[in-house]
Image (tube, helix red, strand yellow):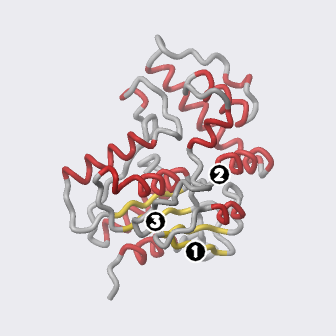
Amino acid sequence: MGSAAASYVVSTAAAAYDAGYDVFRLNFRDHGGTSALNRELFHSCRIDEVVGALKVITARHSARRTFIVGHSLGGNFALRAAARAPAAGIELTKVVAICPVLRPHSTMRALEDGLWVYRTYFLRRWRRSLLEKARCFPELYDFGNLRRFPTLTSTTEFFATQYAGFPDLDSYLAGYAITGDALARLTVPTRLIAAADDPVIPIADLKDLAVTPALGIDVFARGGHCAFLEDYRLRSWLDRAVLAQIEPAA
């Protein structure tokens, strides 16, 4: 989930499909060329509509076993959806979250203070998304020159307070954190895969997740952000790891 066209989503989906699974790749609103399909903007606290989408998918296409796999922000959504699944009547077999956003405040700080390439990448992608939304709905959105907000923090604050209905930046970022008691009621078997050298998700925040028997955590010394490369040909072992988590025990 996230953008259905993201390389890691396509790769994992292909591996699962080749292994015999039926696969749904879920776009968040405004992701994957969907800006014209809805009038309101995407933001990371829109967990209810993702849970709603999962409810429709599982109702229309019943299966003996159902898994959710999410990377990065998609992993964050997957974990929050898993915590809400029983109350929504969604039967899940297992959830696998790879390098999920844990505490958005920490990720924002890591992006602002870390290697410039990550900050530039996310900022450019977000600006393009907002401009595409304005092109689809010019009667609703005129963001002006987005370059007047030179940082992710200033851009996020503008967006959260002016268009997403939050009183301040802190309220927005706290709204999709999975630290604290956010996962305290998690009962769906879940595996979180993280890397100690992740430049985007500070690994120290793992200690602030609620302790629950349903949640298992694997931390690897190296892996970067959703990369987990195994050789100099830039091949990743991640797809095999995901399949190992969802395949039935022999």
Q: Residue 236, percent across and down?
A: 54, 70
Q: Residue 29, percent across and down?
A: 43, 36
Q: Mark 1 Cα within 10 Å, few/some/many (few <14, many 20+)? A: few
Where does label 2 land, which residue?
103
Q: Mark 2 Cα within 10 Å, few/some/many (few <14, many 20+)? A: many
Q: Residue at x 65, y 51 (%)?
A: 103
Depicted 111 relative to depicted 219: above or below? above
Toward the viewer: 212 or 220? 212
N-term mark: 1 or 3:
3
Q: Is residue 240 left or right of residue 125?
A: left
Q: Nearer the viewer, mark 1 or mark 2?
A: 2
Where does label 1 land, which residue?
218
> Which three-letter amino acid code belongs to the residue tagged 1?
Asp
Instruction: In the rendered structure, find residue 96 and report the number of the disc placed on it.
Output: 3
N-term mark: 1 or 2:
2
What secondary structure is found at the residue carrying circle 3? Answer: strand
Q: Residue at x 45, y 75 (%)?
A: 240
What secondary structure is found at the residue carrying circle 2? Answer: loop
The answer to whether marks 1 and 3 mark residues whose Cβ atoms lie closer than 8 Å is no
**Quarter occupied by the C terminus:** bottom left
Q: Nearer the viewer, mark 2 or mark 3?
A: 2
Task: Kindly indicate the quadrant of the structure image that contains residue 221.
Answer: bottom right
Q: Residue 203, percent across and down?
A: 69, 64
N-term mark: 2 or 3:
3
